[in-house]
Image (tube, helix red, strand yellow):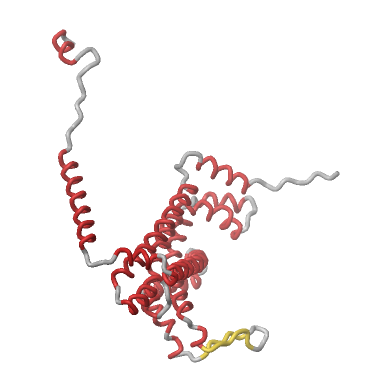
Amino acid sequence: MSTQTTARHGAAGPEMRKRSHPLRWVAGVLIIAVVAGIVYAMAQAKIIWPDVANYIVSPNMVQAVWKTVLLAVISQVIAVVLGVIVAVLRISANPVARNAAWVYIWLFRGVPVLLQILIWYNLSMVVDRITIPSPFGGVLFTSTTNDLMTPFMAALLGLALNESAYMAEIIRSGIKSVDHGQIEAAGALGMSPARTMCKIVLPQAMRVIIPPTGNDFINMLKTTSLASVITYEELLRAAQNISSRNLQVMETLFAAGFWYMVVVSVTGVGQYYLERAYDVSAPGAKSASVSILRTILRPPMKRSKA
């Protein structure tokens, strides 16, 4: 480097200048302006905000929150259990089981959730009584369809069966992500297919299964609003019942929307930590998963005789 160049740039080399990004500033200003406009419009709207706060903490609304969460949790649990069963049948070597699982997924994914809920709720129009015979003779369970198909039961069946079809495909993709060599190694160690599935395949497939399952559960929390059509008093139905008495429709809807945001936000936090626990790329996660796998594959220690 010449003397002039050294004098111009200094001994440490050429000076690095930060590149300007005017479009970032323009985008930031536009976003702030839009948010400020929305806040100003909501402040000028004909909404009584103190009443919204009162409806948020009203007993009917709080009780509806618990009913919403209860319906979503039970539906998701049933969907996961059925999804595991259907996913295992979907990858089975038995062609009858494999095709039956395909038809199950095709049927419940193809029919809209609201239509399924309405079909279950109006099942008494085609079936008067539901009877489960005992394999040893007699009747194991019997009830009229009207007594059995309550709004909660109809919503539960509609949501759970629809979600189970999606869960089956999610779980199947998670199972397929596990290296088949590990399954062969487990079989060589004498592990049964059921034990291999529970101890080897599913724990490793969880990192693929959990993210879409968490998203589906968040969607399930919001889809419970469809149960309002059959008079199940979840959040949306509670808001409609309150507004039918005082005609404050927007105030009650904003109160319901607040609670939806709360339960979805709490679920999102739980999903984040659950994904982090199963993420092999997280610090220490890979070594932890390897140690768990070694513990599973380790043969049981024989007790020494005294």
Residue 229 vs residue 196: left or right? left
Residue at x 53%, y 40% (from the top left corner): 287
Tell me if residue 66 comes above or below residue 131 in the rendering: above
Residue at x 45%, y 42% (from the top left corner): 281
User: In the image, residue 159 lies at what x, y percent?
Assistant: 43, 72
Residue 261 vs residue 276: left or right? left
User: In the image, residue 111 lies at what x, y percent?
Assistant: 36, 76
Q: Nearer the viewer, residue 27 or 59?
A: 59
Outermost front residue: 50
Q: Check the picture and name the quadrant holding the C terminus.
A: top right
Residue at x 43%, y 83% (from the top left corner): 121
Tell me if residue 156 comes above or below residue 213 in the rendering: below
Count the numbered circles shown: 0
Q: Check the picture and name the quadrant holding the N terminus.
A: top left
User: In the image, residue 226 lies at what x, y percent?
Assistant: 37, 74
Outermost right residue: 306
Q: Nearer the viewer, residue 294 or 114?
A: 114
Residue at x 51%, y 51% (from the top left corner): 204
Q: Where on the picture, by quarter, is residue 8? A: top left
Q: Can residue 259 be seen by looking at this rendering?
A: yes
Residue 42 vs residue 205: left or right? left
